[in-house]
Image: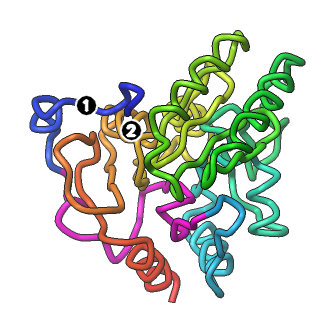
Amino acid sequence: MQDGSTVSDRQFSAIAPHPFVSSLPDRLDGHCLFLDLDGTLLDLAEAPDAVVVPPGLQAHLSKLSILLGGALALVTGRPLAFVDRLFPGNSFSLAGLHGAEIRSSHGGPALLAATDRRLESAKERLRHVAAKWAGVLVEDKGLAVAAHYRQAPEMEIPVHALMREIASSVPGWTLQCGKFVVELRPAGRDKGDAVRLFMERLPFSSRSPLAIGDDITDEKMFDTVNAMGGASLRVGPPSATTAAQGHIGTPDELRRWIEKLVS
């Protein structure tokens, strides 16, 4: 089940090739970098709280951000507070909750979505029903809530049906589908919007964007950087149903590339 954020085979074939498609570059001169988190920088885990930051990754990202003059941003579906726990004391620019939360490393107020009491009722409804479904995990993200069924893929249809029912009770929130997960998140901004906001500001505005992600949730980001003449890469096997211009095999391959850039 998808949320309509992917592109057709015809649209994919029309995307102009980019030099980054054939191989990852040895340098990123003149570019800025937008990175998804789960499944891109980090290996996917069975449970949302079980993700692990490999040793050295935060130091490598910090060095890369310095090399790029601060033009590096993590763009994730996780809330900013969770990213701060994963990378304590980080100095990255961040977009959380698919763009509903924005924080720049170069100062200025963070952009945050407003909460709604109806969201708390929706969370309680989800927790109550999901507690009866073995293998379905509920992730409370504060301003969003997600139902993960990676451990119970046979529950895809009932999970999506429940989430559609719950979403109808919370105006201003929308559903976001991903790999074995469906999420109720604030409407109005997506990862593409987050990239556009960053690209309006220095140090991003003076550079060409490169976006790397792995999931349906990253398609808006791919569309945006493609339209700006930048490059987009998907972590995973080649696919005809993505706007990404090229692919990287695994998160480990991406991490090794980052380490090579800064070493």
Q: Do the numbered discs 2 and 1 sit on residues whose CB atoms are within 8 Å? A: yes
Tell me the tag on residue 7.
1
| Residue, far right | 117
**Which class describes the residues within 10 Å of circle 1: few (<14), some (14-19), or many (20+)?**
some
**Residue 19 is drawn in which quadrant?**
bottom left
Q: Is residue 253 left or right of residue 181?
A: left
In the image, what residue occupies the spot 47% across and 43% down?
Answer: 178
In the image, what residue occupies the spot 62% across and 49% down?
Answer: 136
The residue range painted magenta reads 18-46
Residue 62, x across and y down, in percent: 66, 73
Residue closest to the eye, 150 or 203? 150
**Which class describes the residues within 10 Å of circle 2: few (<14), some (14-19), or many (20+)?**
many
**Residue 61 is drawn in which quadrant?**
bottom right
Q: Secondary structure at mark 1?
A: loop
> What residue type is disc 2 on?
Glu
Residue closest to the eye, 179 or 132? 132
In the image, what residue occupies the spot 78% across and 56% down?
Answer: 82
Magenta portion: prevailing SS class: loop
Q: Secondary structure at mark 2?
A: helix
> What residue type is disc 1 on?
Val
Image height check: is 26 above or below 112? Answer: below
Residue 193, x across and y down, in percent: 54, 29
**Residue 31 is drawn in which quadrant?**
bottom left
Measured Cα–Cα span from mark 2 to mark 1: 8 Å
Residue 107, x across and y down, in percent: 81, 46
Q: Which residue is mark 2?
A: 219
